Amino acid sequence: MYNYRLAVLLMGSVYALESPLADDGQYPNVGMDYDATFQYDHVHSDSPQGGNRNSTDAYPDINATFYYRFSHDQQIQFSTEINPIDGPEPGQKRFFEDVGLVINDLNYYQNNANSAFSVGKYHVPFGRAQDQAPGLYTEDFVSTYDLDGMLGGTVAYRFFDQQWGMIEPNLSLYTADNSFLGRPYLRHGEKLRRSDGGPSNTGKLDSYAVTVNWLAIPAVPYLELQAGFMSNKQAEDETQANPPGEDDETIKIASARYIWAYEPSTDLEPTLAGRYFDIVPFIEFADVDNEDGIKGNDTRYLTTSLTFDFGDWSLGATRTDKHRQSTAGADHQDYLNELSLTYNITGQLKLGLSAGTQKEDGQMSELVGLALTYSGGY
Amino acid sequence: MPRASSVRLLARCASVVALALCGCATQPTTETASQPLRQNPEFTYDASGVTHATLSAAEQQVNVGNERYVSLVFNGDYDSPLIRTRPGGTMAIRLDNRMDEITNLHFHGMQVSPLDQGDNIFRMTQPHQVGEYNVKLPPEHSPGAYWYHSHFHGGSQRQVSAGIAGPILVDGMLDPFPELKGIKEQVLVLRNFQKTLTGKVASEIITSAPSIRTINGQQVPIIDIKPGETQLWHFINIAANQYFRIRIKDGHSMQVLSRDGNTVTRRVDTDQVLIGPSARFSVLVVGPPAGTYEIEAGAGNTGPAGDQYPAAKLAVLRSSGAQVATKQITSAYPTAEDFSKIAVNKTRQFAFQDSATDSNAFLINGTRFELDRVNTTVKLGDVEEWRLFNPSQELHQFHIHQVDFQVTEINGKRVEFSGYRDNVFIPATGSITVRIPFRDPVILGKFVYHCHILEHEDGGMMQAIQVVKPQDYEQAVKLEPLGGLYGENNQLCSYLRNTGQDPKASSPLIK
């Protein structure tokens, strides 16, 4: 229980330090943000045994976040996602199948002048490839360190210096959600159980992540840096008589993103007229020890991408390499190449196209995807 | 899942998306054809120079363009009253808050006292209470177009978008140009109202959502002019978040006479005016040959991380009648001090950035606005240079209360001086440099600078500044975390108390 006390103490300290002024008249109130995507994926896989298989999947991905605001700075947020619970099997053709609802967030969130924290079920802020690398599939490829729906708390503090810019350390404590909040709804599905074991599924706040973001550096204002360390405590898999060797999963990460804008396009008229042009290189390296809690399953991820933004258009190229050092000594190299194009049809409706090649566990695939997304609020 | 239920699910999803895409209520139309531009209801000044006005803020059903909506408006009309005043005049405003929410008033762009009952945005008017404002304009106050609006932090975007905002005109802009005497002035108040399915003003403002863009509350009004006639148009952008990129189609140019209530120092011609949120442009327009001409707001795109909105027909310019003689400026433009040529007392830099972790949070130097602390202290008499940089992939719109400034550089490149402003864009992934004269004793007090895309301001992109007499500087800096020298409510009595002076003594501020 020590960790729980530590978390409460930590959050309480921040609250006491920056207790916001309560508003009345407009609060409490409720609000909602949403985005609804229709996505179609076509995957052509080459089987190592010869032959090939085509799978298609058309599905919705609807995210809704509901807010109950106590004041301008304090709120409870509850977010759900409706999408297929599992991916298609190779060769399977699906149309709106296996769709269920999962709860991604249910937390109390407070954003103060220099700090922010949330307690409850939340997304662990760690790594940037899942958000910053363009394309439809990179997010899944780096899901090892993109942890959604964890139970615990996270706190960040923003330091600013006229010479150094903004330095934002962030600490997250969490455990995997094996409660009723972690099960899928609107369909039959297995929820994570404590006995399944796995990284951070210990029932205790004994997994943690630390990141430091360094942004808005006056000398290089368009450079964004992140470094981080994550430790996911391994829980024993009680469902297997002879589970594989297990150990805690640890991840070290570093990333850099730079926005280079063609200066004449940043003047007011060209920007408003949709002629703003920038190029955004991004690189992220993640060194994973004991991925999935399997002892010796050490991997390295390297994501590199280049994004070209021009007015309503965005063209992106992303490559993610995943290097796995086998316990048997033979190394494996997986990768994902993705070329993507996004067009903002209106400010609320966008169309994304993506095509790529992937090698995963020795299997080669070609991917083509289309996503139409509408976003709004109420 | 069986195919039939999949199809039904798809049909349901398609219906939801179609409804969302529509994003608009088909409210009963009350007027369909274009009507001549109506003049704003007006409060003007009496012989002593005092403008008495009561602004009753209430939620009620009103016409927004050609549609009916329940919104928050002043005096029962989406077209808010024009407050007319003059240099040396006083605006005695009674804010009758009949809404169920807090509000207040800011007198945008005016160089007036921020203390007490002046342009004091730290003072709130509670629901169903009355707030009194007495805003005294110095005799040398710059004539031109200004505006008033809610500055209730956290609610300003919604209230301004709903209608809690209106125009102000300080008379005298044409005084330096007697050759223009008698030309027709038109106040053109630019607004954007988000369409909703509920028939009520939106509770969550989506800047890119389908909207109704109006001039003086009208959709596509007709502006009449005679061929050859010179008119003075005051474009006042009181939309919460939108930029207006306005041109008269068929290539008619306009001559800029004033920006943000500051007469330009040299001739400036343009074929389109780029009016950022909160900006005002007063332009001379000459009637074209007989015919009708579309006045268009171009599509807007504020950057990859910003908003997009489509082009819209704003109004129709109808030129008719007999040709009249065109009046042109022949007098010299007023002069103004070029601050780029003087040594500044202090240089500061500010990063206006989107939060990397919270899409609803916006920061200045890593900080969200906090009502009870001061971030910047300035000595009265100083001229400061501020470098504003924007690491975000969307525009921000810098505005500072109580003072005008000079833009000296955009992205490090020198800008030729043509007059002052009170707001300016900060390029997406770019920078802008301004020089600000904190010289006029009337500005002593606490006020704010912020992004005037009000979504960003409400999200925290705002900081408080106090201007103090040089001898009070050290004490004022010490009091920054406690709300500054002027106290939480920005009052003269707090200043006197905090500087150890007798509150019963006469005001030391103007000595």
Image (cartoon, coloured by chain):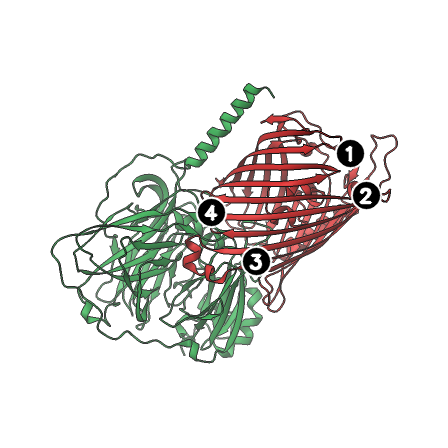
Q: Which mark is residue A194?
A: 1
Please give the name of the residue rendered at 63% of the width and 33% of the height, measured from the top-left corner. A43
Say which label, 1 or 3, has the lower sequence index. 1
Mark 2 vs mark 3: which is more N-terminal?
A: 3
Q: Say which colour chain A has.
A: red
Reply above or below: A369 against B389: above
The colour chain B appears in is green
Q: Is there CB contact under 8 Å for labels 2 and 4?
A: no
Alpha carbon separation for disc pair 1 and 3: 44 Å
Amino acid carrying label 2: it is Asn
Task: Report the number of numbered marks.
Answer: 4
Calculate the distance from the C-alpha at mark 2 to the C-alpha at mark 3: 35 Å
Labels 2, 4: front one: 2
Query: In the rendered view, does A121 fall on the left or right side of B162?
Result: right
Between label 1 and label 3, give the one nearer the viewer: 3
**Rendered location of residue A147, percent (x, y):** 69, 43
* Residue B150 x/y as whole percent: 40, 54
Q: Nearer the viewer, residue A72 or B301?
A: B301
CA gap, disc 2 to disc 1? 22 Å
Which residue is denoted by mark 4 in the rendering? A25
